[in-house]
Image (spheres, rainbow, N blue to C red):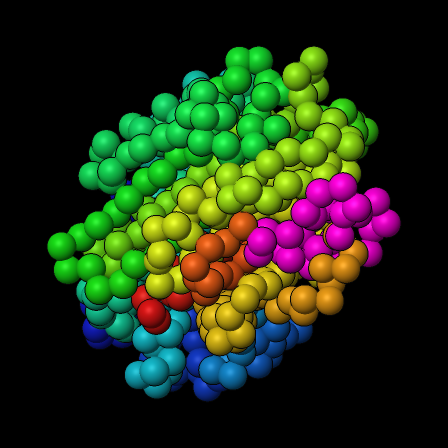
């Protein structure tokens, strides 16, 4: 997706907007006296028994005399980022539903209000105008260039640096959603690895992969236990590196990439197996963050580690009561084969931590208990570094991707003690599995690397979430991109 951005610091008048077909007006609490098409807005408010103040609750849409479509919304400066983005998403939906080739955004208010409104509106418009995977025959036959947004004009604010970073973040979000939405017959581990290799070549990333034979020889028994159940055995840990010459920090990103999760021998029922091609979303988030950082030319070395596999049933598939030995020598008692995510992540986290990054973060659609705890509006974060957790919570609120921190106390380890191995993979008792999973993963991190674990309970919400209208929303890219910038 490539959108041309045009900016004008001066507020727009009706003459400047006369050539526009789709307009979004982002207003302040006080109605500007010189607001273009004010008579149209007032007529619509009168007809619907509303007042200008009601625009703080939701947008108003009306046709303009020249045939254009306009949407007006008021953003109170005290609103949270999440609420601002949600109101903007709803305000721009009628405009984007018409698939315009160009769209104008006019912002009003104080200098600070215009700056924030321009950034928020551009992000929400652009991220929702993106082309996503679509397999409907009629859509494929009718698709034309006019059905894709190509140009956004902003009136009332101008800033090249910040908008370049927003465009980088949007590219990362779109990559994450595109990969996550790809059907499983088009994104098995072999196909996924090929796509990643092509992406690495185009972006100048170093590419390395550890296939099943190599991982077996290395002793990565946790990962191999999951990968060995598939035919072909095409699972692998993929390692990408972005390393600019001016790198000042070294960060590691780790992503769970289960291309399809049947549950293994502990087979999921149909209701819960549906959608399990999206169980690779964590790896897609890691890739999206890497792409955003690359496009923004952030001055840091980033290692990206992707645990790519499928969780299938077969004669070689791992089973309950197996005992396997992980890469770091820890023996694991298998309790439930549907807890495969923590298995593939265990050895991947060991590899990542052995490079001794300044800090690391992993992303995974890991536990149902996190969904039970938070629903699909928030994701959960846990980790071994309280300052990193606090930073993540604060930045999540600032960018509109909300996260909640959970306990990480070591007495939870009592629940995953094993009588025959060093540790149990999980329990069969339910409870705080999101905490147990994180305590389990912590056993595979070496050199005391500060580490943040993101359990993506909000990666898919029907009807959209915050800025993003699609069910699969790319959650985690904006949060982590901001975290990288802050560090």
Q: Judge whether 18 appears above or below 203 on screen.
A: below
Question: Residue farthest to the right?
Answer: 429
The quadrant of the rendering that contains the C terminus is: bottom left
What percent of the width, then of the height, locates residue 299?
Answer: 21, 61
Q: Residue at x 49, y 76 (%)?
A: 387
Q: Residue at x 32, y 66 (%)?
A: 485
Q: Is residue 442 magenta?
A: yes
Q: Quadrant of residue 438?
A: bottom right
What percent of the width, then of the height, locates residue 267?
Answer: 78, 27
Q: Which residues are magenta?
A: 417-443
Q: Please indicate whether residue 456 sits to the left or right of residue 352 in the image.
A: right
Q: Residue at x 86, y 49 (%)?
A: 429
Q: Judge whether 374 appears above or below 229 on screen.
A: below
Q: Please indicate whether residue 157 sits to the left or right of residue 478 in the image.
A: left
Q: Nearer the viewer, residue 286 or 76?
A: 286
What percent of the width, then of the height, locates residue 228?
Answer: 59, 21
Q: Nearer the viewer, residue 423 or 469?
A: 423
The quadrant of the rendering that contains the N terminus is: top left
Q: Nearer the viewer, residue 292 or 174?
A: 292
For the question of whether residue 90 can be seen, the reply is no
What percent of the width, then of the height, locates residue 26?
Answer: 42, 70
Q: How many marks?
A: 0
For the question of whether residue 264 can be seen, the reply is yes
Q: Is residue 326 magenta?
A: no
Q: Judge whether 461 appears above or below 14 on screen.
A: above
Q: Residue at x 28, y 44 (%)?
A: 241
Q: Nearer the viewer, residue 113 or 60?
A: 113
Q: Please indicate whether residue 231 sits to the left or right of residue 357 in the image.
A: right
């Amino acid at each position: 997706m490539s959108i041309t951005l045009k900016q004008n610091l001066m507020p727009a008048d009706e003459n400047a907007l006369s050539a526009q077909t789709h307009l979004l007006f982002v207003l302040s609490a006080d109605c500007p006296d010189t607001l273009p098409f004010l008579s149209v807005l007032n007529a619509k408010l009168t007809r619907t028994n509303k007042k200008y103040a009601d625009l703080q609750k939701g947008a108003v849409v009306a046709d303009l005399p020249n045939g254009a479509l306009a949407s007006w919304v008021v953003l109170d400066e005290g609103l949270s980022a999440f609420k601002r983005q949600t109101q903007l998403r709803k305000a721009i939906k009628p405009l984007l539903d018409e698939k315009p080739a160009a769209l104008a955004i006019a912002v009003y208010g104080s200098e600070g209000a215009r700056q924030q409104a321009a950034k928020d509106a551009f992000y929400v418009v652009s991220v929702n105008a993106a082309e996503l995977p679509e397999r409907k025959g009629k859509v494929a036959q009718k698709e034309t260039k006019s059905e894709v947004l190509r140009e956004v004009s902003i009136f009332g604010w101008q800033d090249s640096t910040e908008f370049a970073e927003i465009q980088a973040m949007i590219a990362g979000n779109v990559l994450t959603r595109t990969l996550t939405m790809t059907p499983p017959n088009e994104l098995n581990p072999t196909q996924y690895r090929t796509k990643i290799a092509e992406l690495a070549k185009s972006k100048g990333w170093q590419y390395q992969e550890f296939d099943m034979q190599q991982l077996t020889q290395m002793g990565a028994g946790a990962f191999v236990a999951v990968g060995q159940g598939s035919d072909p055995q095409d699972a692998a840990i993929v390692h990408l590196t972005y390393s600019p010459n001016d790198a000042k920090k070294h960060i590691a990103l780790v992503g769970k990439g289960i291309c399809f999760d049947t549950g293994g021998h502990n087979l999921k029922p149909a209701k819960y197996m549906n959608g399990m091609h999206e169980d690779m979303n964590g790896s897609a988030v890691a890739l999206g963050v890497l792409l955003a950082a690359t496009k923004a030319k952030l001055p840091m070395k980033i290692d990206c580690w992707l645990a790519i596999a499928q969780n299938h049933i077969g004669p070689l598939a791992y089973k309950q009561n197996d005992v396997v030995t992980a890469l770091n020598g820890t023996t694991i008692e298998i309790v439930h084969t549907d807890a495969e995510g923590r298995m593939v992540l265990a050895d991947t986290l060991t590899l990542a931590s052995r490079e001794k990054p300044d800090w690391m973060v992993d992303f995974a659609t890991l536990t149902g208990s996190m969904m039970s705890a938070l629903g699909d509006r928030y994701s959960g974060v846990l980790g071994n570094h309280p300052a990193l957790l606090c930073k993540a919570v604060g930045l999540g609120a600032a960018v509109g991707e909300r996260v909640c921190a959970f306990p990480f106390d070591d007495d939870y380890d009592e629940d995953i003690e094993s009588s025959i191995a060093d540790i149990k993979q999980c329990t069969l008792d339910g409870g705080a599995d999101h905490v147990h999973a994180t305590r389990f993963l912590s056993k595979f991190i070496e050199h005391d690397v500060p580490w943040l674990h993101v359990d993506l309970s909000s990666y898919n919400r029907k009807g959209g979430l915050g800025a993003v209208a699609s069910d699969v929303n790319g959650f985690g890219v904006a949060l982590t991109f901001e975290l990288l910038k802050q560090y």
